[in-house]
Image (tube, helix red, strand yellow):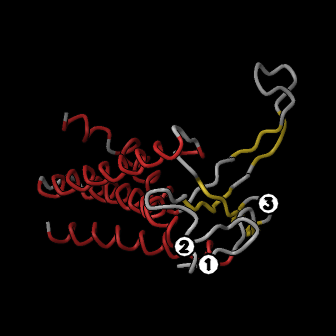
Amino acid sequence: MKSITTKSVLIIILILILDQTLKIWIKTHMVLGQEYKVLGDWFIIHFTENNGMAFGMEFWGKNGKIFLTLFRIIAVVGIGWYLRTLIKQEAPKMVIISIALIMAGAIGNIIDSVFYGIIFDESFYQVANFMPKDGGYASLLQGRVVDMFYFPILKGHYPGWFPFNANQQFIFFRPVFNLADSAITTGVAYILVFERSFFKHMN
């Protein structure tokens, strides 16, 4: 049990360090909207910020943002409790690691939402300053999540007969995401593909 506990903690710490290091580098070296092509037009580092939920959705203005951040914090506490329970029950190692990935990703994005508004100034038309003298761009719990990974692998146009977005451009994969998002997606995908039987048994 000690071994898997140590591995889980190390996974969470490693993902948080990598996630935050990359985000801080992006904030202090790039202007919002700036991008670098890594693999032609297929893999691009594109600096954007997410004001709310997944894919940039927002609701209820500032109060909604505070509610969302507090909800995420409560959710992470719940995930942490569940992870501890799985370790005590000696659940399969990859189940525990998957939950650890989800927890690490959630914490990574919470850090942005809670603190980035007060430790950085704006990235519009300038490279953001860390701990600016005049204060950050927002108050506590009002920060924006930094995203940077963009994979527009397929580009084209919807056919004219299509029932929606006829003749308009489509891009796959359009959303821009970060390392924390990747950790969450990886953890969830592994559970859905390989560990559904375990959770059915738990129920």
Q: Name the mark nearer the viewer: 1 or 2.
A: 2
Q: Nearer the viewer, residue 147 or 137?
A: 137
Marks 3 and 1, how far apart at CA: 29 Å
Q: Name the mark nearer the viewer: 3 or 1.
A: 1
Label whose residue precedes the other's in the sequence (3 or 1) = 3
On the image, numbered disc 2 is attached to which residue?
A: 135
Label whose residue precedes the other's in the sequence (1 or 2) = 1
Q: Nearer the viewer, residue 91 or 85?
A: 85
On the image, numbered disc 1 is attached to which residue?
A: 129
Q: Residue at x 60, y 60 (%)?
A: 147
Rendered position, 195 above or below 28: above
Q: Taking 160 as reference, is 124 left or right?
A: left
- Using a 10 Å C-alpha cutoff, classify the residue at mark 1 as few (fewer than 14 neighbours), some (14 to 19) or many (20 or more): some
- Using a 10 Å C-alpha cutoff, classify the residue at mark 3 as few (fewer than 14 neighbours), some (14 to 19) or many (20 or more): few
Label whose residue precedes the other's in the sequence (2 or 3) = 3
Q: Taking 182 as reference, is 89 left or right?
A: left
Q: Nearer the viewer, residue 158 or 111?
A: 111
Rendered position, 165 above or below 124: above
* SS under mark 2: loop
Residue 163 in picture, x, y percent from top left? 76, 19
* SS under mark 1: loop
On the image, numbered disc 3 is attached to which residue?
A: 41
Q: Residue furthest front?
A: 134
Q: Residue at x 37, y 62 (%)?
A: 104
Give the quadrant of the N terminus.
Answer: bottom left
Marks 1 and 2, how far apart at CA: 10 Å
Residue type at the position of mark 3: Asp
Residue type at the position of mark 1: Asn
Q: Residue at x 45, y 66 (%)?
A: 115
Residue 11 in picture, x, y percent from top left? 35, 69
Q: Residue at x 59, y 56 (%)?
A: 177
Residue type at the position of mark 2: Gly
